Each structure stands twice: as structure tokens, then as C-alpha cells.
Amino acid sequence: MIRVEDLRVTFQLPRRTVDAVRGVSFEIEPGECVAIVGESGSGKSVTARSLVGLAGPGARVDAVRLEVDGQDARRFAPRDWRRLRGGFAGLVLQDALVSLDPLRTVGAEISEVLRVHGERSRSARTRQAHRLLEEVHVPEPQRRAGQYPHQLSGGLRQRALIASALAAAPKLLIADEPTTALDATVQAQILRLLAERRAAGQTLLLISHDLAVVAQLADRVLVMKDGRIVESAPTKALLTGAVHTYTRTLVEAAAGRRRATGPAPGPVVVEATALRKVYGDRAVVRDVDVTVRRGEIVGLVGESGSGKTTVAQLLFGLAEPTSGQVRFEGQRFSGVPERARRPLRRRLQFIAQDPLSAFDPRWTVRRIVAEALPRGASPAPFLERVGLGEDVLDRYPRQLSGGQRQRVAIARAIAPRPSLIICDEPVSALDVSVQAQVLDLLAEIREQDGTALLFISHDLGVVRDLADRVLVMHDGRVVEQGPASAVFDRPAHEYTRELLAAVPTLEVPA
Amino acid sequence: MITAILRRAGAGLLVLWAAATAAYLALLAAPGDTVDAIVGDGADTPGIRAQIIQEWHLDRSAVVQYLDFLLRAAHGDLGRSYLLQRPVSAVIGSQLAPTLKLAVAAAVFGVVLALLFAVTARRLTSTAGLILVSTPPFLIGIILLSIFSFRLGWFPVSGDRGFAALVLPAITLGLPIAGTLAQVLRDGLDRALDEPFAVTARARGLRESGVLIRHALKHALLPAVTMLGWSFGVLIGGTVIVEQVFGRPGLGQVTVQAVNSSDLPVVLAVVILAAAVFVVINTVTDLAYLLIDPRLRRS
Amino acid sequence: MRRFRATLASLFVTTTLVVAGCSSGSPGGNAAQAGEPVSGGSLTWAVETEPITFNPHQYAQAKTRLLVWNTFEALLTHDDKGGYLPWLATGYEVSPDGRAYTFKLRTDVTFSDGTRFDAAAVKANVDQLLAPNYAPAVAAVQLKNLDKVEVRDAATVVFRLRKPDVLILDFLSSPQGAQISPKSLQEAENLKAGGPQLAGTGPFVLDRYTPGQEVHFTRNPAYNWAPPNAGHSGPAYLDEITYRFLKESSVRVGALTSGQVQLIEGVPATDESLISATPGLSLQRGLNSGSTYSYYFNTAHAPFDDVLVRQAFREALDVPAVLAGVYRKTATRAWSVIGPTSPFYDKSLENTYGANAQKANQLLDQAGWTARDAEGFRTRDGKRLTVRLVQSAPFVRDRRDVLAQAVQAAVKQSAGIDLQVQLVDQGTATKALADGAYELFDNSRADTDAGAALNLMLYSTGSINRTGFKNPQLDKLLDDAVATTDQAGRTELYRKVQQLVITDQALVLPLYAPQDQIAASRSVGGVGFEPTAGVPGSAYRLWLGK
Amino acid sequence: MTIALDRPGAARARSLRAPRPGLAAAAVFLVLALLAALWPALFAGDPLAADPLHVLEAPSGQHWFGTDQLGRDVFARVVHGARHSLSIGVAATLIAVGAGILLGLLAGLSHKIADEALSRSFDALSAFPLVLLALLFIAIAGTGTTSLIVAIGMALVPHFARVVRAQTFVVRRAAYVTHAVAFGAARSRLVVRHVLPNVLGPVPVLAVLGLGEAILLAAGLSFLGMGPQPPSPEWGAMISEGRGYLHVAWWASVLPGAVVTATIVALTVAGRFYQRRFEGRELA
């Protein structure tokens, strides 16, 4: 169905050329489910999009062979590509909120595909759109078709996007990170849907950074790194006997690795009782109690909208609780003026998901870290601790990679020797291999400094790997809490069970 | 819903009051008093001055005059023009239609041209638009006038008689708008075409023109709508100059004359009118947003 | 004085007015092309200035005079020799003491609203003019000596004055003295603004006014009382005429050359060659009455408190050269404060001063302005010889701002005088004048009787006396001239005034005689200027040939 | 073998590269304009030397831009006018930027209600016709160069204030500012160390773009007769004075107009280049 030989894609940017794909060869047979796995910048998306002539702005695509649906795509005129798109291959992108036109109704988006591919009758298009929505299990398809993407939940949106990609009955469905932006439970639903299509005989090309996600679906996995395929094997073979070291790293990272639990917890560092936060008429946090002791890593998990970030802000003193109280190191930390908090401030640090926005863009790394230090102290030792050389000192945050930035953020956080660091999704924006390194670093810091960590994440995997104790939040409440092992192995609350079930896990066959 | 409308109306009134008061205070600070303005360069004796003071009630304190002005304005009475000896509402009223006609024609021309440019000739847009925006509008007017009216005789030189007389002024006024709008649209289109949904649309087999018109254009309209308020500012400001160049009747002429001769009631009325237009345009802009972007609508 | 005295009748200085065969102003130079006068047709005339009012009583803009006489008429009109011709009045008599003017009125005149024109109407008009808050300037200036108006009978009206004032005749032939239907005076909604609601007796009726754009007149078919110098009698030739307001001179010229209008007034000198070069167009110029466009020296403070500096400034300037630069060869150089077309003009002043840089420098040296600063300007006691001319932007016309720049360059070059030209808004200008923050004041007045202008400009208490010059002898001369009814006497008095002001005191630097230009299609006949006033005439005489 | 060159992307890639020749031209022009403003004598002679014998002469080798109604050399006036027009523009922009920064910071940093009131009025005022605003100020202050500068400056204030307020609003809530709380920084310290520098960063770019606006507005007001006093060779006044001679001497108004256009185009090109660079759109 697809035959690619020595595919090369280069991007001509104003001042330089970027080789995104450097000689990739693969084939896809009908009925197969092939996955391309790689980290950001590996060229996986560009490869997939090249198959429908959408490599991207300024892209130059060369290949020894590029056979799509039995035709030589190298000689395609724009018309030929258009016929192919939608008809032969449907494309599903990451987040339906931006991948579906936000200004048009879901129904219009689906019926557009039908119109482009020859369905003249408007009423027929509407009927088909409803049928398609039904096929991807969207309840009340009539009503949903008339709604806009933002009015649908993440899961429904993504289903609608898939429905639109399937509308013209394409032989091949290309799904580029189809679940990445979704909560775990929703992700599980979408994966089930894709599995269902595959079972129905749909050929699938799956692109993902998450080996765990594709492992459930794919027959064959292509691992890409730096524009090349480093390994290509049937899924099972890849998981058990990866040849390439990079693949092994990926497999290990995806499988997760439990970090050692810390020493016995010390005195209470922060204690929040009956926290409640109401915005307008919506209670975002309801009656939450959190206690973190010295040397302890407490995981706070929940899906988007569960209120976990608000809890972080309340603990950190960026927002005042509507009711309830926060005490830090035994002193009142909520309901007091900032002036009263200031002496305690350095003992409490924060690491955000997106370190770039947490750095003053005009400052060098030196200055950023020095801000956290007494005047005149050198930032170099702290950078060394987080594994960064002195060469980064005079660079600006935007010149660093994501992993390096998060290390700088950690360096800055540990510099004042805090008793507690609140980490809000600190590794969510990072590639899996880098994630593992950062988690190691955090575990090490706890180990060496005895610093307590409140680790907030939607990703149960990382929490399980790191936390001693876990709190599960849902709808502003803590629904379950306990030692990590207990919560993960014997979840008591139904929601926790659901959440755990949804997490794609890489079950490496023994 | 009702509270929203009430709030809107309240805010509108507040803007009107603020504009009127600010202008009133500003003019109070102007050199030369009202009597000077009424006397102009004509004969000037104490007797004449006394009569003027009596006729226009200028002997009252500034506060009383201001309150009186507000009270009357609230009843729709904007006073009488010192210079033209007619009710201000009549002066403004008679000039409103030609200016509105010009502004609307220019806006339509500008928007159509901008759309044409942005959609069909995107590459040309930035250069052409930049030059148009950077040229003093009166120069454009003068050049258009001398070519198309004096030399070629295609359009009447001036006045407000029929469509033909509207063409050149509307073009003059519309070109800078088209220039800016085309650039904003072009930027918006470029941005929208880089969005994931544009990739999705292309992946459906949609032509580039289809992606442009069915998807990207609506997105590009959002920033363009923001420009709407600005455009009307430019239009109204532009009429001041364009009407002068083309000898068209209209508020622009009235404004310049009123400013020149310190015709306080007329200046105040123009300010209030401009503020009212602002309120209306603002409301229209908000409505347009709601129309274009469903995300802003509350269920 | 309440009643006619019987004795007066025989002693009246009777001015019998010639009814026919009067001079008819300047003849239409394009009569040949336009052919014989024909009735019918419509014309469009582009004019520079939009009237701020259509009520003749409120008239204040000489540029709009041509519109007034289409709808309104006065009791008398000017001939071109400084005398008066009958119009709505058939004749007048002046009492020997000069304090009573008796007018005989026409009896066949009706206003366009059907009201009869009679003595009561005349009185109603004057009463209105004297009404509070109506026309304070007219009441305070033109009618300052009026005691009352008496209606003798339907066709006779008497103006009684507190003291002799010959200018009352000028007033009664001026737009402010024009007759409005008494009905309109009572009923018009915006009386002071005028417009279609005001009925007059003129050959046209104003029926449509579009502010900022145009005013439209249609023929008054009943009209049959043209003044003797009107060139024809009966209704006007044209069915209708539209005046369009085009402020920009290039736009007016463009409109004419592209055939969109048939007549324009206000042709800038630089465009005259274009008009002459265009076949089918003709150009005429008429010199205005009143005072010339002049710079008045402020004698209230230094440096123009010194007559030597005033003289020096006049000598420093080569008036013909700057006029040639700014107006090409179209401007008429002025020698006196009074225009050359006025019967009171003193021709002997010509070539008595000016364009003598050497003399200017000598005079300045004498006056103590001996040193020069780095920029070449003269100084005295370390102070630069700076003089300020404040021009009010809204009232600048005829490129007087450009002329000021030319003067500025000239006096700098020839005598090291720093002339600073300030083009400011009306409020600032008024303030500058009130504060005396000026050394030069520029002005021309279009009064048909030059004496009226001089009273305002030169009289010690004149309301536009900007020279600060107060001289009992001058006041006496001006008073006498107004009280004297015979023209020769007045001419002699005004000759003395001019000698005093121009030659002895060098109070004024006359620059040019204001003029009006009319450019017209050669198919338009009867194009000409109003006698004495020298402004474009009304539409009564116009016709459209072929 | 090249298979596909994606069209919109190509256009975009080109649009990023396209201004290069334009940028160079703009830079050269601006340098020339600046030189003309600083040392006009380098380029041309006396802008005030009137020559009644050679009025309104067409452009020639001797008078590159022809002569005007007083026989003055239009090129010399344009060159010397650079000082007037640019300094009016610069002075007005400085006023606008200065006051704009103050008011914008005030609004952006002050409490909700004060901010609301201030920023609402900025919104309203910046949607208000610029010309009308400037006319109002002129009605108060009278005509003349100083009041022209003040009028233009004041008219542009709301625009700058609005931008600065928006920027302040964003920066103040930026993660790196809230984060600085973690180090016990006092509010004033936050403002000085983080907010101010980041708010002021884009201001020079805005000022360059605003300068174009100011020059254009000055030209418009000069056209309405509210500009500098004659015989200052201010560009707008030159166009205005020259327009009466359009039939016989187009150069007296069109050529100064072309210079105004070129200046503003050059300023905009330069301003946008730096703006793009600032926003990081220009890939270094």
C-alpha cells in the first residue's frame, strides 16, 4: 500500500537548511497497523505527513521511491495529492481542539470531507455525518454535529476528528499523536476506538512518542531518531529484544522504574487543612487536607480540572483559600499578608511544567540561578549538581533544550535549600528518556538533602515511580490517599481504579 | 441577558459623559474666551461684547454653564452654533449623511479591496499595503483628483451628488484602510494556514483556495474585526482631510471650521458624536466577534 | 427731530437719480462668444467661500457678496464713480443739516413670499437690526448715529440721525441694509442663519441649500425692478443657478477646466496661465473697493513706535518684486490705505516711497539699530530687530501667508529685519491682538465706501484700530468726512487723511489692492463685477449662450 | 528530485526572506534622512533662498525637485525639512512614549478598578480619531510647532499606554514574575527587576513604528494649516503649500509627499524587522 525508499525531507529556513528526515525506508501492507515511535524532532511526523504531501512549509521531499496506493507519488501534481488526501488516507492530529476548525461545527467539518470527495447532496452529507459520528460512538450524533469543537469534551472531540478522517472511507488512517493531549481515561477510550477500527480491517499508521500507547495496537514498530529509522521490528520482538540501545532506553523509560523510597519521614513541613477554593460559583477545591513531611515525596494525581494545580497554588501562597488553612513549618502561611510569608519564602520552592515561562527571558542562566542565592554566591555548584556544565551559565533559557531548562529550574529550586519543593507537572513536557533522567535527579535530591517534594502530575506512571505517598484528586476532592504501593496495587476508590485501568502500560513479555 | 444590555448601555453613557466632560474641560482651557470666538475678526466694541454675553448667557459661572450643557445634552439639545447661528443638531444633522455615506463607501471599498488583495495577491499585499498606509491621505486624494477628475474627467471634482462624486473620496479614504486591513488579513491568513486545523483541512483533499476561504479567512477576520474600531477612527479622522481636499460637505468640514473658529457647541457635539460612534462600533465589534467566533458565545 | 419741517423741502439738497442709461460696470469680455443674451438654462458656479449665514443683515464675508444680491436687494446701489443709483428706492433727499434722509420707494415690488415691499417693511428691517442679540456689529457701527426710522406713507420712509452721517447711504446700499420680507423676519425658524425661509425681492429665490456643498437659486419670474445699471430689465436670463463651495483653488480650476462648472471665482495667479491657455475659457479681474491689503504698524511699543523704523520697513521692501514672486503679474500694487478704484484715492502718493534698501538701512542706523547678530539681523542694545505678524489661519486668503513669507525673506535680505510670521488659530490671534503681542497687523476691508473702513482702522477708538495710533487731528478729519455730504469735500478730507497716515506718519505699508477673479466658460455671457465693490456680480446679468 | 514544495509555506518562507533588499534600502534611506536632519548642509543649500525669477520651475539638474512658489529649491527644502519633520515626529513620539509608559504602567500595576477605568479610557481614546484628538489639543493650545508636537504626542499617548498596559498585564502575571515571589522578593523589587525591563523591551520598536504615525499625522495637521510657521520647510506644510500649484507644478507637492511616504515605509520596514526579531519570529 505504501512503499518508501530513502525518503529525505529538508526544510529550507531563511538562513539554514534542516534535514528532518534523512533516508527512511519502510512499507505498509493493507490491514497492517504500523507505528512510528520517536521523541520530539525525530522526524516521525514529517515522515508520516510526507505520505500525503503535507510535509510542511518550505519542505523539500526527495525519495528513491515513494509509492502511495500503487502510484508513484514523486510525479504527483497538487491535484493528484488532493485526490489522495481524505480518499486514500485520512489524517488524525494530536488535539482536536485545534485540529478541527474551532469556528465551524463538527458536522460541517465531517461533511466537508464528503463534499470534497464527491457527495453533492447536502442532506446525504448530513445523514452520513451523523452515521459517522455514531460509528465512533458519539452519543446523540444529531445534536453533537451541530456543536462546535469547544463545546465537546476532549474525548468526543477526538472521536469527531477521527470520524472526519474516516468520512471518505480511506484505506489508510494516519493518526499522529492521537491521544497525547488527552487525560488517561479518555486516552484509553480513543485507543479502544482505534483498536476497534483495526479489528474492522482498517490499515493504520500510528505516530507517537509513547511506546506504551502504540504497543497495545501496532503490529510493527519503527523507531526513529534524528531523522533515521534506528530499528524496525514486530512489536513483540521489539519489546523483548531490542537491538538498538536507543530502543532499549525507550522501552525501559516506558516500562517505568520504581525509585527507592526515602528515609522515614521527618516532621511536618506543610500542613493544609480543609482547604476550599471557590471561583465565582464554582468550587474548584473542596475540603482538601494535605500534609507533607520532611524527606517525603507526596504524589498528587488527577486529571485536568481535578483541582490539583489550584491546590499547588494555595500551598505555595499564590492564591488565598476561600476557607481552610495552610501552615508551613508550623507557621501560618495562608490568610496572612505576603510580608509575613516572605521570611519563609526561600524554604518553599516551586518547579513548573514549562520552565521557559518561569524564567525571565532577558536573564542568563547565571542570573536566574543567582536570584535564588544570597548575594555573591556562585550558581555553578548547583548547576553541577543538576548535571549541567559551566558552559550554560551565560546562555539564555531559550537557547537550552527542554531537559536542560528543567534542570536549571531544579538548580534554582534547590539553591536556597528549601524544605519543600512543589513540582507541578515537572516532566510532562519532556521526552520520555529525559523524563527518566529528571525523575532520577529529583529522587537524588530528596535522598541527599532530605527535601520534601509535592509532586503533582496527571501521569500516574511517573507518580508511581517516584512518590512515597499518593493523593488522588477528582472534582476538587481527594478521593483516595495512602502509600503509593497501596494505592496503586489495591485501589480502594472506584475512580482510582478507573484511572489505573486507563493507563497504558508496557507489559514487557518475560 | 438584560443586565448585560443594561451594563452595556450604562458603560456607553459613561463613555459619552466622559467624552463630553473631557472636551468641555479642554475647551475651557483654550486661550481666548468664547466672546472672542464669536466676535471673530469683525467689529469689536464693549457694547457688542455685552450683547454677545447676554445673548449666549456667558455671564454664568463655568460650572452652571457646564451643568446646563449636560442637562440640555441629555435632552438631545446640543445648543446653538456660535458661528452658524443654527441649532447644533441641525448643523451636525445636515452633515451627517454625506460623511456617513463617505465613511461607509470607503469602508466597503477598503474591506473589499483588502479581501481581494489578501486572498488573491498575498505576496503583493505587504508592499502595496505598506506604501498605501505610509502615504498622507491628502496626497493620494490630490493625485487621484488631478488624474481622474481634472485630466481624464471621469469623476466629478467634488460635492456630494450621486455615486460618481463618491468614488474618488471613497477610494482616497479607503486605500489606507485597505492597506492596513490587507496586511492584518494576510498575517491572519498566514497564521491560520499554519494552524493544525489547516493541515487537517488539507489532509481532507481540500484545495488550497478552499482551505483559505472556508477555514483560514474566518480566522483572519477576527483580528480584522478588531481593526474595525480603529478603522472607523481612521475613517472619521480621514473625512476631516478628505472632505477638505474634495470639497465635500460633511462633518469633517464642520469640525475643522468649528475648531478654527472655536465654535464650542459644535466642537462638543462632534466629540460627543464621535464618542457615540465609538460606543456603537464597539458594540458592533463585540457582536461581530460573537458571530464569527462561537467560542465566545455563552450557551 | 420728530417731523418733517416744512422749510426743509426747498432747502433739500436734491439728488435726482437718473433712471436709464447708466454705466453698467465692466462689460462682459466674452460677449462675442456667448452671443446675444438668451433666456433659459442653468449654470454652476464654483465659489471659494461658503457663507456662514444667508441672512444679509448678518453679512460679514465679502467673498459671499455675490450670493446676497441674487435674493435680496437694497434701497440703493453703487455706481462706479462713488455715487448711488436707485434700486428699491426711486430717490432720496437729504436735509441740509445732514440729519434726515428721506427715501421714496418703488411701489411695484413684492417679496418672493408675496408680501408687499413698502415703507413699513423698511422700518421692520431696521427695527430688526436694532433688536437686541440680533446684529450687534451693525447696530454698533453702521447704525450708531441712527435715531429712528419714520414711515411717512407707504412709499416714503425717513431715516433720522443723531448727527450727520453720510455713510448711512453706503449702509442702505450694502448687504446689511438689504430688505428681508417682514413676514420672514417674524416667522423664519433660524432667522440669523437665513436660508430658503428668508424671502427677499431679488431676481432669484434661494430654494435649496446643502451645507458644505452648494446653494441653489431659481429665477423669480415676477421680478421687474432691476437697478438702472443692471444691463437689462425684467426677470433674470437663467432659469437656475447653483453655487458650489470649493475651498481648494486647484479643485475649482480643475472643475472648470474639466467642464464640471461653468464659472469659478478666486483664480490663483499661478493658474491664470492655465486658464488663458485653455480654449473656451476666459478670465476677468476686478479690483475690490475699501481698504487695500496693508500691513499696519503697531506704534504702541518698540520698534514701530519710532517713525524711522516704520519708514525703514517700508523702504526695505520692494513691493512689486514680492508681488511678482507670489502673484506673478496679476496683483495691483497699492500705494495708499484706500483702494485705487475709490473716488477718495490719492494718486499723488504713488512712487513716493519704497524699494530703497539703502535708505532703509540708513533709517535703521539712525534709529539706533546698528549692530548685526550672527544670523545677520539688526540689533539694538543686544536685542534683535524682531517684528511679529500674527495671521489668523481661518481668515487667511489670497495666499497672504505666502506673501508674508516673501516679505519675510525680502526684509531679512535687504535690511536685516527679523519678521516672524505666526499663522495661528482665531483664539490665539485674538489673544495676541488683545495683549499687544504683535508689531504688524495685516488687513483689508471690502467696504464699498472706503470711509467706513478708515473709521474702523484709523479712528482712535475704531474697533479695529491695531496701530495704537491716536491723533485728534486724524479723528477730526475722519469725523468731518462722514458729516460732509458732497463728494469733493469728502475727497479733500480723505486726501489729508492719506497724507497724514501714509506720508507723514508711515503708519501703514500698503501692499496690494485686493481683487477678485472670475474664470468662465466662453459660453457664459454677462460675466462681470459689481460696480464700486469690485466683487463678482450677481447672477442677474448672466446668460448661457449656445 | 523535488516532489512537492508546499505552497503556503513557501510563500511564508519567502515573506520572511523578502524584506532583505527592502530592509537594506530602508536602512540606507533612514541613514540619509538622519544625516539630512543633522547636517542638512551636506546635501543642499539654503532652503529659504527665494528667487522670484525662477518660481515653480520643473525638476532639472540644478533643482532636482524643481522650485516652489517663491522660487525656493524644493530639494533643499525637503532636505532641511527632514530636521523639522523628524524632530516633530521624534519629539511627539517621545511625549507619547513617555506618557504612555507612565500611564500604561500605572494602569497595569494598579488595582482592578483603577486599571479598569484607565484601560477603558485608553481603549476609548485610542479608537477615537487621531486627527480629531490632535485637533482638540490644537484648539486648546493653538497652532504652532510646539503645540503640534504636544497635540500629536497626546493623541498618540492612549495607543502607547494601551500597549504598555497590556504588556504590563501579561508580564505581571507571567510565571517568572509570580515565581520570583518564591525568593521572597518584595513587590517593588519585582516591578523593578522583572516587570519594568520586560515591559519596556518592545517599546523602542513601538516607538519606531509610532514615529511613522507621528510624521504622518503631522503632515495631515500641517495640511490643515495647523503646522509649523512659515517658512519652515516642514514636509506636510510643503505638500499643503504645493497643492495649490498642482496644475502647474506637481513637483512642489508630490515630491515632498514621496519623501514622507519613503520615510514612513523605511521606518515601518525597520521597525517590523526588529519587532519580528524581538518576537523571535526571525530565525537567527
Image (cartoon, rainbow, N blue to C red):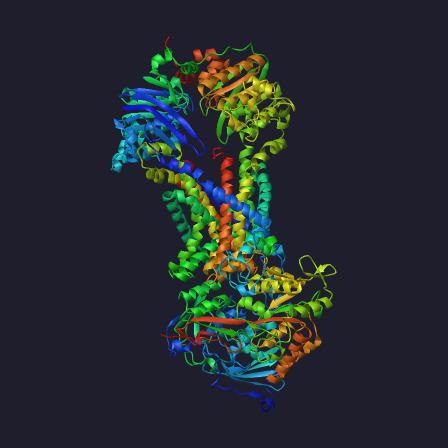
Asked if residue A136 shows in the view, the reply is: no
For the residue pair B194 and C483, the one nearer the viewer reads as B194
Q: Give the quarter of the image for residue C35.
A: bottom left
For the residue pair D137 and C195, the one nearer the viewer reads as D137
Q: Position of residue D198 (x, y in %)?
A: 56, 34
Which image quadrant: the N terminus of chain D?
Answer: top left
At 39% from the left and 66% from the top, the residue drawn is C259
Taking C458 as reference, is A94 left or right?
A: left
Q: Position of residue A373 (x, y in %)?
A: 62, 23
Asked if residue D237 shows in the view, the reply is: yes
* Relative vertical location of residue A199 with respect to residue C250 in this rendering, above or below: above
Q: Position of residue C296 (x, y in %)?
A: 64, 69
Taking A378 as reference, is C173 left or right?
A: left
For the residue pair C121 and C531, the one nearer the viewer reads as C531
Q: Give the quarter of the image for residue D15.
A: top left
* Relative vertical location of residue B96 with respect to residue B129 in this rendering, above or below: below
Q: How many marks?
A: 0
Taking A420 as reference, is B101 left or right?
A: left
Q: Quick one: which residue is furthest to the top in this view?
A: A510
Taking C207 as reference, is C380 left or right?
A: right
Q: Position of residue B255 (x, y in %)?
A: 51, 57
* Relative vertical location of residue D96 with respect to residue C84 in this rendering, above or below: above
For the residue pair A248 and B25, the one nearer the viewer reads as A248
